[in-house]
Image (cartoon, grey):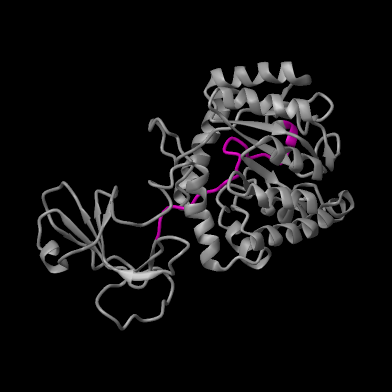
């Protein structure tokens, strides 16, 4: 059972709380009927939990004594699982359009309202690590990227891009984003087959000098970086120069895999595997049939990406869920599809997939002490 201490001055017992439409296996042990997920090194376990205004978790010393106290509310778990809120390592909170060219030009007001709706959708779906951090708008914890930064010959979609050519111009763009208050700097280093110019996902558009300059400038201002890095060379550059989060990594080769394994304590891969799956299977209703997706190379990219990501998981490289949500065929509210993909496609156990979406994303947020676990304290 879970007990919540309230400030209402009355004692609440939520025994009539209706069960969800599931039939968990009956628990015949001691009267502790919540299964808790704590961390990767421990399987789910049963027990009681004391919740102090939903901000702390502690062991319950005397259930009957607590139940009699004023202001203690009792929830009967009925076999449900208690776990921390889920997180997502790669989403687009302000996007929800099938027309790629309409992702950027919308007005500030429209973008703000759309973002608020998306944030509420995250909360309603149980994903709580994205944030409207000031607390003015309901929403989970959130780390905001700047606009995709790309060279003028390597953009994906013009409306979402901050253009820069060469190390010095890229430094200036980063300074501008820092002044805007972003948390991360995003480099659009490789192509994407569905982009307006059909730039190949196997091509890398950044030079070594540009990548190093971006990392130096971002780190100088205390910002981390992430890279749209499908291509082999973009993955290698991301690892070589210390870009913390690598998106996609579809075409990683043996050299890149070795480099990533050697530096796995410094990097996180967020493959957005759901984007590839949905582009193949769900985009036809929005004008992009499977035949076109296969012709563009998405089936091949998916197959290669699955093999590479399974190998990353085998080597202990951190791979986190996050499915590029915000496109028409990867809509907000379908975030948990990633958990299924991680189990069915990437070789994760169900427990590993949940830990990746809780403790794993907490590590990405650099808040492992506060997020991603159910523990006393």
Q: What secondary structure is the stretch in magenta mostly built from?
A: loop
The stretch drawn in magenta includes residue 95? yes
User: Number of marks in the image?
Assistant: 0
Question: Can residue 271 be seen here?
Answer: no
Res. 218 image quadrant: top right
Identify the residue at image location x=61%, y=28%: 146
Query: Would residue 106 appear left or right of 305 to someone viewing this image?
Result: left
Q: Position of residue 241 (x, y in %)?
A: 69, 35
Which range is magenta? 83-101
The one of 251 and 291 positioned closer to us in this rendering: 251
- Find the residue positioned furthest to the right: 295
Q: Position of residue 342 (x, y in %)?
A: 62, 61
Q: Position of residue 164 (x, y in %)?
A: 75, 20
Identify the residue at image location x=73%, y=16%: 169
The one of 144 and 249 positioned closer to us in this rendering: 249
The stretch drawn in magenta includes residue 325? no
Of the 4 image quadrants, the one containing the N terminus is bottom left
The one of 204 and 123 positioned closer to us in this rendering: 204
Question: Can residue 162 be seen here?
Answer: yes
Q: Position of residue 157 (x, y in %)?
A: 76, 32
Res. 336 image quadrant: bottom right
Query: Would residue 72 appear left or right of 291 to someone viewing this image?
Result: left
Query: Would residue 142 appear left or right of 107 to someone viewing this image?
Result: left
Identify the residue at image location x=42%, y=77%: 23
């Amino acid at each position: 059972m879970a007990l919540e201490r309230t400030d209402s001055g009355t004692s609440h017992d939520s025994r009539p709380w209706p069960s969800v439409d599931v039939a968990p296996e009956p628990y015949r042990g001691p009267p502790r009927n919540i299964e808790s997920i704590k961390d990767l090194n421990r399987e789910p376990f049963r027990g009681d939990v004391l919740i102090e205004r939903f901000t702390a978790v502690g062991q319950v010393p005397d259930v009957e004594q607590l139940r009699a106290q004023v202001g203690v509310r009792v929830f009967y778990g009925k076999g449900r699982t208690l776990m921390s809120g889920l997180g997502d390592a790669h989403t687009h909170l302000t996007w929800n359009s099938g027309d790629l060219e309409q992702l950027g030009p919308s007005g500030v007001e429209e973008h703000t309202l759309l973002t608020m709706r998306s944030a509420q959708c995250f909360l309603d779906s149980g994903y709580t690590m994205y944030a409207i951090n000031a607390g003015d708008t309901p929403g989970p914890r959130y780390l905001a990227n700047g606009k995709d930064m790309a060279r003028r010959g390597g953009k994906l979609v013009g409306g979402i891009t901050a253009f820069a050519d060469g190390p010095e111009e890229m430094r200036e763009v980063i300074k501008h984003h820092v002044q805007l208050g972003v948390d991360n700097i995003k480099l659009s280093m490789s192509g994407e087959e569905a982009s307006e110019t059909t730039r190949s996902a196997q091509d890398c558009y950044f030079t070594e000098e540009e990548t190093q300059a971006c990392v130096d400038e971002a780190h100088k201002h205390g910002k981390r970086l992430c890279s749209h890095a499908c291509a082999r060379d973009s993955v290698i550059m991301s690892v070589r120069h210390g870009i913390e989060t690598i998106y996609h990594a579809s075409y990683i080769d043996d050299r890149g895999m070795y480099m990533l394994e050697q530096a796995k304590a410094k990097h996180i891969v967020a493959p957005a595997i759901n984007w590839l799956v949905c582009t193949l299977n769900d985009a036809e209703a929005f004008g992009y049939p499977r035949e076109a997706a296969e012709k563009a190379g998405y089936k091949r990219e998916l197959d290669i990406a699955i093999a590479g990501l399974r190998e990353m998981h085998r080597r202990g490289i951190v791979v986190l869920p996050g499915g590029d949500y915000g496109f028409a065929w990867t809509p907000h509210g379908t975030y948990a599809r990633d958990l299924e993909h991680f189990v069915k496609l990437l070789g994760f156990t169900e427990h590993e997939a949940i830990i990746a979406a809780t403790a794993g994303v907490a590590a990405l947020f650099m808040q492992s002490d506060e997020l991603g676990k159910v523990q006393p304290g």
